[in-house]
Amino acid sequence: LYFSTQEGILFFYHIKGLQYEMKICANVLQPISGLIVSPDYTMLLLVTVQGTIYTYKPAHSGEAVKLLDACSSCFLAADFLTPGNKYCVSVTISGEVQVWFLEDGTCLSKLNLDIEV
């Protein structure tokens, strides 16, 4: 079970029967508004209320890596494009939909919906 706090800390609870173990995985220092699991369960996308998107790979037990930073318009939501977990799609408050390469944060495509989301 993964969950986050208002302080931006990502926690992992390993639950087995009536026993559990809690682990702090990452601290992004911003409240997390979205936590999305990749289709193959190898990566998490963390979307903050300030519009920044981080990736976290549970198997590597490292820190969350900033993938995208809010520029002119905050990211409202993000999700993985399936199949696989090489790409994600995001939408900004201003209505811009973007496709990103997760490995290095390269924007591959964008479409402006011409409407505020």
Image (cartoon, rainbow, N blue to C red):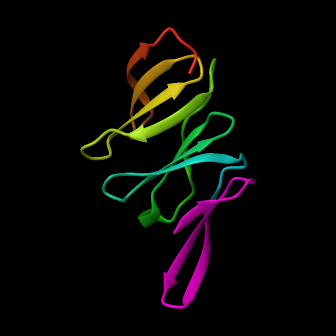
Highlighted magenta segment, given as a residue range: 1-25
Quarter of the rendering occupied by the C terminus: top right
Residue 6 lies left or right of residue 108; in this view the side is right
The residue sitting at 50% across, 65% down in the picture is: 61
Q: Residue 3 in magenta?
A: yes
Given residues 66 and 41, the one toward you in this image is: 41
Q: In this image, 81 relative to 57: left or right?
A: left
- Which residue does the image show at 38% across and 51% down from the upper left? 38
Q: Is residue 42 above or below residue 76?
A: below
Q: As drawn, is 92 to the left or to the right of 50?
A: left
Q: Residue at x 53, y 35 (%)?
A: 77
Q: Residue furthest top?
A: 114
Q: Position of residue 108 (x, y in %)?
A: 36, 23
- Is residue 45 part of the magenta span, yes or no? no
Q: Residue at x 24, y 44 (%)?
A: 83
Q: Residue furthest left?
A: 83
Q: Residue 97 at x, y = what percent? A: 44, 22
State whether the magenta stretch is mostly helix, strand or loop. strand
